[in-house]
Image (cartoon, grey):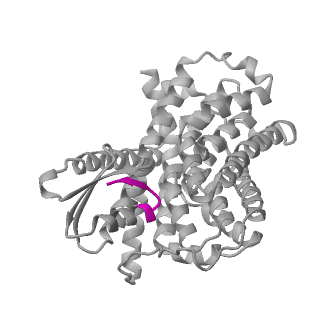
Amino acid sequence: MQFLNTLLYMLNEMSPYILLGFLIAGLLHAFVSRPMMARHLAGTGWRPVAKAALFGIPLPLCSCGVLPTAVALKRGGASRASSVSFLVATPQTGIDSIAATWSLLGPAFAVVRPVAALATSLFAGVIVGKNEKPEGGNECRLPLGDVKSEKKTFMAKCVAALRYGFIDLVASIGSWLVVGLVIAAIIAIYVPDDFFVSLGASPLLAMIAVVIVAVPMYVCATGSIPIALSLMMKGLSPGTALVLLMAGPAANFASFTLISREMGRKAAIIYLSAILIGAIAFGLAIDYLMPASWFALPSIDMAASCHHMEFEIFPTICSVLLASLLIYTFLNRRSKNHLNDTEMTQKYIIKGMDCPHCQAAVTKAIHGVEGVEAVEVNLATKCALVKGTQSPSAVASAIRAAGYDVEE
């Protein structure tokens, strides 16, 4: 019972801010087009790199979802330096995670987190830019927008914003948010209070340990927040918590592999190094250079709060709404995973498709191929079934243009 109470308490603290973040993220998605982004990210120098970082920081994309977006930007005209900057900045934070960070960890963390993302992405982008050769005119440029170019009305964009923010985005990061909350509740209830005392005495050692765990752990920017909170409550320093918040969402082996293929091994090494070195550097700065009072946790008596269970009305309504959205998207995803192979003519195995955002990107890419009548993409089996008179090579090319590999 105490575990459930703790879980509900954390959900109540975060849900109003998460819903606000989803709304703002949907508005960004609907009103800021990817072709416009690419136009601003072309060219050399620090300006496109800075624009890429500033574009990426508010976007609520996880590290797997940002990969095809960055690849599409690169193939659509963005420089390699800008693309790497976008890759570093985007998964570390987002409008939703900034709001949730403020709610659980306080305003100092909410400010330092995007600043750290900006600094590390600028560093990575500038270094890559210094090693980037001017691109010749023979390089293939792929279009970034929908194949069917259509101008949407303001009302249609608003509807699209609500659908993306409260349906597509919830489906994309909802599972990671739930996992993060569950792990945080487990740590808060079952891990002894003095478990991390020895690591807490040596912040640098603790940060290295967190990096080793965080890189393969693969958690989204919002889902990492309750985990960081629970670890701080058990004795880890604020700087170590920041390392988890930066390295966990941004760095993973799948990202490194795809970046190596698309942008070169040197760019991939710079990408990974910038995240890890930047995370530890900012973590040490928090622990040794900034006032500890800035990063003191909000006065949370978890045990007392959980026993009394006196939740305010508005956060509780937000929690119910968020839980309803999570349940709806889960059931909707399950219903779409029942495929009928007999109605389809071609089958493709997709590599690198790890979240609903990826699923939507692959579906959209295949739908744009001439002759396609119907598409069903199963995230669980990594399989795409396509019906129509389309060319198999055209479908495969569309999937690769979206930033994924395919087995025909």
Q: Is residue 176 visible?
A: yes
In this orientation, which residue lies closer to the viewer: 106 or 208?
208
Task: Please indicate whether residue 349 sits to the left or right of residue 127 in the image.
Answer: left
In this orientation, which residue lies closer to the viewer: 54 or 310?
54
Seen in the picture, residue 73 relative to 383 is either above or below; the reply is below
Q: What residue span does the magenta drawing correspond to?
A: 400-408
In this orientation, which residue lies closer to the viewer: 276 or 300?
276
Q: Is residue 54 visible?
A: no
The residue positioned farthest toward the front in the image shown: 138
Q: Looking at the image, which residue is at 67% across and 60% down?
A: 85
The residue positioned farthest toward the left in the image shown: 342
Seen in the picture, residue 93 relative to 34 is either above or below; the reply is above
Position in image of residue 161 (x %, y %): 42, 67
In this orientation, which residue lies closer to the viewer: 314 or 259?
259
Position in image of residue 296 (x %, y %): 74, 36
Looking at the rendered structure, the number of numbered marks drawn on it comes to 0
In reply to whether residue 160 is colored magenta, the answer given is no
Identify the image quadrant of the C terminus: bottom left
Determine which quarter of the picture holds residue 394.
Answer: bottom left
Determine which quarter of the picture holds residue 78.
Answer: bottom right
Q: Looking at the image, which residue is at 58% across and 34% down?
A: 227
Seen in the picture, residue 310 relative to 159 is either above or below; the reply is above
Position in image of residue 1 (x %, y %): 41, 21
Seen in the picture, residue 24 relative to 98 is either above or below; the reply is below
Position in image of residue 300 (x %, y %): 62, 32
Q: Looking at the image, which residue is at 23% across and 73% down?
A: 371
